[in-house]
Image (tube, rainbow, N blue to C red):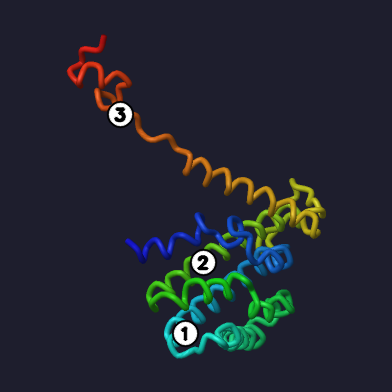
Amino acid sequence: MKYMKEFTKGILKENPVLVMLLGTCPTLATTTLLSSSLGMGLATTFVLLCSNIVISLIKNFIPKEVRLPSYILVIAGFVTFVSFILQSYLPSLYESLGIFLSLIVVNCIILGRAEMFASKNNVIASALDGIGMGIGFTLALGLIGSIREILGCGTILGISIGNWFEPIIFFITPAGGFLVFGVLIAVVNTILKAKTNKKPKEEFGCANCPSKDVCAGKGECK
């Protein structure tokens, strides 16, 4: 149950983008198209998973004085690996992500999980935390990218949705990205607030009666 909680928390309850508001720069910059959104999300998930595992394994061997530089070195190694793979096999995606792919190294989501979680927990929990946060990040980017591509380009994954809809260019601009981002944050926060504010089930009987001290629980209130 504990491990399942570590996996699921990043999907909605602690979603790094829509709840914790981390990684805003790559979120807004790479979500004009669904393909680039998913590419950034999956690349970040891979780096999150691998860096969390490695940092959890070597945490006891890293001096406190060089903790953060060591984390960045580990993360940078995996980012370089991902960059080489995309450049070799998916050059179009590599070009669309541009500098934001390299900036995964200093992404506050990855550094935050390394510092706050992987460095303090075992390998299994760290791996599940990385996967969960990565999935939450990917889902958030995919949702924003889908909305912006459909409304701004009239396509989804490059496939036209038909001539019945006239694209609104505003949604593929930075301002449109901020608008979609803000609306989704409001929707997610409303959902989470509704869950946390659920009233507890009312119980009936003498235990909750304001006059229980008068009748001594015998149902003889005067």
- Is 71 situated above or below 182? below
Residue 57's place in the image compared with 188, above or below, is: below
Instruction: Give the residue furthest to the left.
Output: 218
Tag 1, which secondary structure?
helix
At 79% across and 48% down in the image, what residue appears?
166
- Asked if the residue under mark 3 is in contact with the one under mark 2, i.e. CB atoms within 8 Å, the reply is no
User: Which residue carries the number 1 mark?
Assistant: 54
Question: Which callout, 2 or 3, points at the residue further toward the start of the chain?
Answer: 2
Residue at 82% x, 55% y: name it.
Answer: 169
Q: In this view, does 186 lie to the left or right of 7?
A: right
Which amino acid type corresponds to the residue marked 1 in the rendered image? Val
Q: Which three-letter amino acid code belongs to the residue tagged 2?
A: Met
In the rendering, which numbered label is found on residue 133? 2
Q: Do the residues labelled 1 and 2 touch (CB within 8 Å)?
A: no
Q: Give the residue at the far front of this rendering.
A: 214
Tag 1 and tag 3, C-beta contact below 8 Å = no
Q: How crowded is mark 3: few (under 14 residues within 10 Å), some or many (20 or more)?
A: few
Q: Nearer the viewer, mark 1 or mark 3?
A: 3
Q: Percent position (x, y) of residue 92? A: 71, 78
- 208 left or right, relative to 11: left
Secondary structure, mark 2, is helix
